[in-house]
Amino acid sequence: MYGKACAECCLARDPYCAWDGTTCTRYLQNTKRRFRRQDVRNGDPSILCSRYPQKTSVPERKIYGVEGSSTFLECLPKSLQAKIVWTYQKTRSDPQKEVLLDSRVIRMERGILLRSVQHKDAGFYYCHATEHGFTQGLLHLQLEVIHAQQADSLSLSR
């Protein structure tokens, strides 16, 4: 319903759903199960879910951008109240740095737009959702930038 982890269920703040220890299930107030977890007002998974380890894996995808063109990196939070933060690594051994917005990197409702992609933009992009001090990885993207001439030759060969 709202994911496969206690935190995702709690952050949804749905008054009709609660974490039962294994899944996010329909919540009926007259049910006598005491182990169900939900806090509609605060939705704080750090308190409600401390006993339940994170079981979700973060999807990884490889995407391609054409040099000089725009590339959109899409990331949708599971909670509308979450703040999305993007980080970047040139290589996996480099430290992650927050993606800085400027005239070429624009925050959009559903992700970030890289305008006029350059080879220096290639690398690993990570989308994180932060809410109530709880951070959850949502998506890992590997961006590979190809030369415009290479893209032209690929489209002509079809």
Image: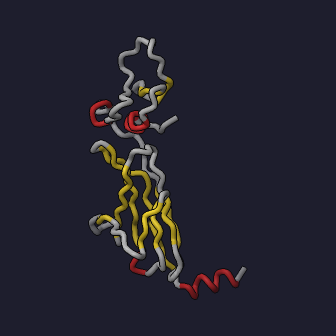
In the image, is residue 15 above or below residue 102? above
From the top left corner, tell me how far across and down residue 45 is, in percent.
Answer: 32, 36
* Residue occupying the point 48% across, 37% down: 2
From the top left corner, tell me how far across and down residue 48 is, in percent.
Answer: 31, 30
* Residue occupying the point 43% across, 37% down: 12
Q: Nearer the viewer, residue 151 or 93?
A: 151
The number of numbered discs placed on residues in the rendered structure image is 0
> Within the image, what quadrant is residue 15 found in?
top left
As drawn, which residue projects farthest toward the bottom? 149
In the image, is residue 15 above or below residue 124? above
From the top left corner, tell me how far across and down residue 143 is, in percent.
Answer: 46, 70
From the top left corner, tell me how far across and down residue 87 is, in percent.
Answer: 34, 63
In the image, is residue 143 above or below residue 37? below
Task: Look at the image and tell me in which quarter the C terminus lies.
Answer: bottom right
Q: Nearer the viewer, residue 151 or 109?
A: 109
* Residue occupying the point 50% across, 82% down: 67
Q: Nearer the viewer, residue 18 or 41?
A: 41
> Within the image, what quadrant is residue 88 found in?
bottom left
Which color scheme did the rendering employ for the protein? secondary structure
